[in-house]
Amino acid sequence: MKMEVIRPGLLSTVQDEGRYGYRRHGVHPGGVMDTFAARTANMLVNNLRNAAVMEITMTGPELRFHENSLIALCGADLSATVNDQPVPLWRPVALMAGSVLKFGRCRSGLRAYLSIAGGIEVNEVMGSRSTDLKTGIGGLGGRALRAGDILSAAAASWEARAMLQQLLGQAKLGKTQMKGPIWHLSSREWPLYQKDPVIRVMLGADTSKFTRESLERLYKEQYVIAPQSNRMGYRLEGSRLELEQPMSRLSEAVTYGTVQVPADGQPIILMADHQTIGGYPVIAQVARVDLPVLAQAKPGTRVAFQPITHEEAQQLFLEQERRLQLSAAFIRRRLTETGDRQ
Amino acid sequence: MLSPLGEAGVMIRCGDAISDEVHRRVISVCAWLEGNSFPGLVELVPSFASVALFYDPIVVAESARSALGKGTHRVSPYQQVCRMILSRLEMLEDSVHNQFRTIVIPVCYGGPFGPDLEYVASENELTPDEVVAIHTSGEYLVHMIGFAPGFPYLGGLPKRIATPRRATPRLRVEAGTVGIGGEQTGIYPVATPGGWHCIGRTPLKLFRPEHDLPSLLQAGDRVRFEAITEQDYMEWKEGEG
């Protein structure tokens, strides 16, 4: 399956779950920002969870599919259409050869994930297909997609091929050129991409070194995501956070979701392309289950923080994994059902 | 000594200062845990005085369930990982510290590759040749690699050539540039903006994504700098292809 980039959109890149094992070499894991949406998109077309997908930011691309393809779109609602027909999200969709997928207004969220049965095939660099724009490695030459790029997918699973055949083999599709099954993933399973999200945070390495008033402000007031935010970090604007007394701190490892506070008192949340080592005081760590919510928040969004214990956060993460595995089992059963009831 | 770093990390603190002793401990802990891995261990990241251990909480939870049977769900993956770390560190032998490598970094000092050499010299009331002699006389310790791919944090800069950072950072410092910033010296692996004084450039590639070990230097390595001529530099570069 091949797809051609007619227009690239604002920032469309190839990403997988990230590049692990190289943090000690200064290489951050990177990978998709919203791991939940990307993983679900892969599940819906029966891909392995680490298959490469397209991460589409805010203004979507225009893509032509050269062959019949089974795709899924999850995450942000960027008004995707094929021949002016809206493409449903959170379910597999069969596209006929020649279909052109377009995106429009950003209705909710910030990043959409496009999976294609088989997964986008680009060379692995250090065990990952993720594009790292900063270092210029991975994906398609380490860069964002450009007009004229042609992306191939690896061989799709037989389940995905059977689903594709079944959907396209049904009634005449006419002008719509696409067909989805009647089932879809229940919206109860999607993370809440709220307008003004509440993000749960646990203690960071230096939480106790901040003034009590600062910690109260962190939990009572809202912070606005600044326009300079990107895949590396979200800069927040709001009440100043201050240390009890100035401290010099040895640089040490940081991770996705670490909340640092530089001298100006305005917090920065490290995102997927974060640096591996950081020296600023760390006031908090975002709960992993809320990182997809944060990844979907655009600049200007108001964010509130709520404390959570480390143990609760880890339990929530295990619970989310359990539900994802149930969803995966549900989808696999649907994909393999013969004579899909339609 | 142990604290969480998110739901998939543990910070193992080995001290609270930059010293050779703390560094030895960091490298020993790192090497020991690496040699005595457990299911779910993803990677280790040494820094000045700590080792961050990253793990997969799902794998840890599953392996705990299958090893210990029912009733273990009350132990969180974090607690489980802490137990495994502590049981391994109990057996830690302080014998790893002899295994360091010494890596010689050839540097073409001054001229177009080191536009700030004169400045560093005059600030310290030395001649440029003296700065080069002092910079090449020292042995430097790689405390950690981080911040950017392949970027080494080096310890051991002789104080006589320490120079405060530039008031205005350069918009572009070329890959391979050797710089001095305050009491630190280092090498920029990739072109980036930077505020350190550029005193020379190495033809070596510090970040090589195509290698198994993508960073030329590793925490625990010793580094020496060796002065080369511009002609050596060019030949070296050509040899690198």
Image (cartoon, coloured by chain):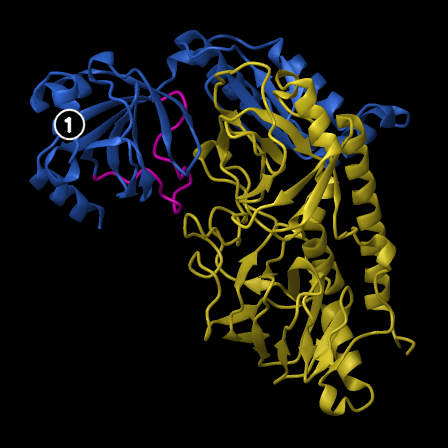
Chain colours: A yellow, B blue
Q: Amino acid at mark 1?
A: Tyr
Q: Position of residue B12 (x, y in %)?
A: 59, 18
Q: Position of residue A57 (x, y in %)?
A: 59, 60
Question: Can residue B218 be spotted in the picture?
Answer: yes
As drawn, B19 above or below A236:
above
Is residue A154 highlighted in magenta?
no
Tell me the quadrant of the picture where the C terminus of chain A can be found: bottom right
Tell me the quadrant of the picture where the N terminus of chain A can be found: bottom right
Question: 10 Å neighbourhood of mark 1: few (<14), some, or many (≥20)?
Answer: some
Q: Residue at x 85, y 58 (%)?
A: A187
Q: Residue at x 77, y 51 (%)?
A: A194
- Magenta span dominant secondary structure: loop
Judge by depth and name the residue closer to the eye, B119 or B77.
Answer: B119
Q: Position of residue A208 (x, y in %)?
A: 66, 17
Q: Residue at x 9, y 39 (%)?
A: B230
Is residue B213 highlighted in magenta?
yes
- Region rendered in magenta: B203-221
Judge by depth and name the residue closer to the eye, A236 or A88.
Answer: A236
The residue carrying mark 1 is: B119
The subunit carrying tag 1 is: B
Question: Can residue B189 be spotted in the picture?
Answer: no
Instruction: Give the left or right position of residue A258, taking residue B74 as reference.
Output: left
